[in-house]
Structure formats: C-alpha cells, structure tokens
Amino acid sequence: MIHTKNDLPVKTRRQMVELLDARLADVMDLYSHAKHAHWNVRGARFLSLHELFDKVAEMAEGQADEIAERAAQLGGEVHGTMRAGAKATSLREYPLNIGGVDEHVEAMASSLAAFGKNVREGIDTSDKADDMDTSDMFTDISRAVDKMLWFVESHQAPQQDGKKMKDHPESSAA
C-alpha cells in the first residue's frame, strides 16, 4: 500500500483495493466483450447493435477508470494491464465464433448481468467495511450497468420471468 492521509483504516483500504482490483479485471473484460461484439455482429439489426455495443464499451471504459482511480486513492497499486485482467476476471469467456444478432445480444446480456451482480456484491462488501465512498461509487456503476443491460435486453423477445408475456396472468384482458 502507498502511504496516504486517507482516514480509512489500513485494513479497510487493503480490503477495498482487493475488491476494486477484482472489479477492475471484470470491467476490463466486459469492455473487451463489448468491442468484440461491436466488431463482429452481423444481421438485420447490425447498425443499432453495432452502435449499442460501442456504448457498452464506452460505459465500461469509464467505469474502469472510476474503479482504478478509487483503488489508487486508497493507496492501492492498480493492476490494469490486459494480462492481469485476463488472469483475474470472473466473467465467462465471450463466445468467439458467433456473428448473429441474437447470439451477440444473449452473450452481451449475460456479461452485463454477471458484472452487475458482482458490482452489487461490491456495494454490500464496501458498505459492511464502512467505506461509503466505494459503496456509493459501486451504486453509480450498478445503475449504469443495469441501464445498459436494459438497452441490450430490449433487443430480445419480451418475456416475463422466463415465460412469454401471453402466459403471464396480468397480461390477459379482464
């Protein structure tokens, strides 16, 4: 740890830097997933998804910077290389041999959902460690990820809890 006058206890700062480093690896991986999809999507909805996947990548790039800078603020050494991230990511490998819009939408939605889940766990962990600033940062990231997930999932057929909308009792006429 690098010396700082930050008043969080060293133990808390170490724990948060470890957490932040793990989420940095994930968000860098998410960025690569989005760029891969952006470059390789093909099909009838190409243009809208090509642009959307680029927005996901932009969001991930911005969140990576936030996460890395928070770790540095706490006195941590940031492990932000592609190789370090590849070793540490908890996200599943993005499928390399797909090109169709539906397959990319599903893969991107899965990546966003997994990252969002990890970020929400980070909210709880940092909250329990009494690091409200990190918790607040993760809350902001969670909202951004959920928004991107909503945008991506909007390209899928509507479903309600795994069932088609017509099977949902509230969707039938009274």
Image (tube, rainbow, N blue to C red):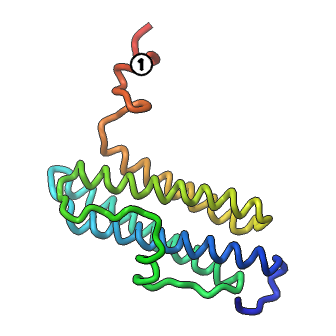
Numbered disc 1: secondary structure:
helix
Q: Residue at x 76, y 60 (%)?
A: 128
Q: Residue at x 58, y 74 (%)?
A: 67
145 in relation to 73, above or below: above
* Residue underneath mark 1: 171
Residue reaching furthest top?
174
Q: Nearest the camera: 90 or 123?
A: 90
Q: Amino acid at mark 1?
A: Ser
Q: Position of residue 31 (x, y in %)?
A: 40, 70
| Image quarter in which the N terminus is found | bottom right
Residue reaching furthest front?
87
Residue 171 is drawn in which quadrant?
top left
Residue reaching furthest bottom?
3
Q: Residue at x 83, y 78 (%)?
A: 9
Residue 15 is drawn in which quadrant?
bottom right
From the viewer's perspective, is 100 left or right of 150?
left
Q: Residue at x 31, y 63 (%)?
A: 94
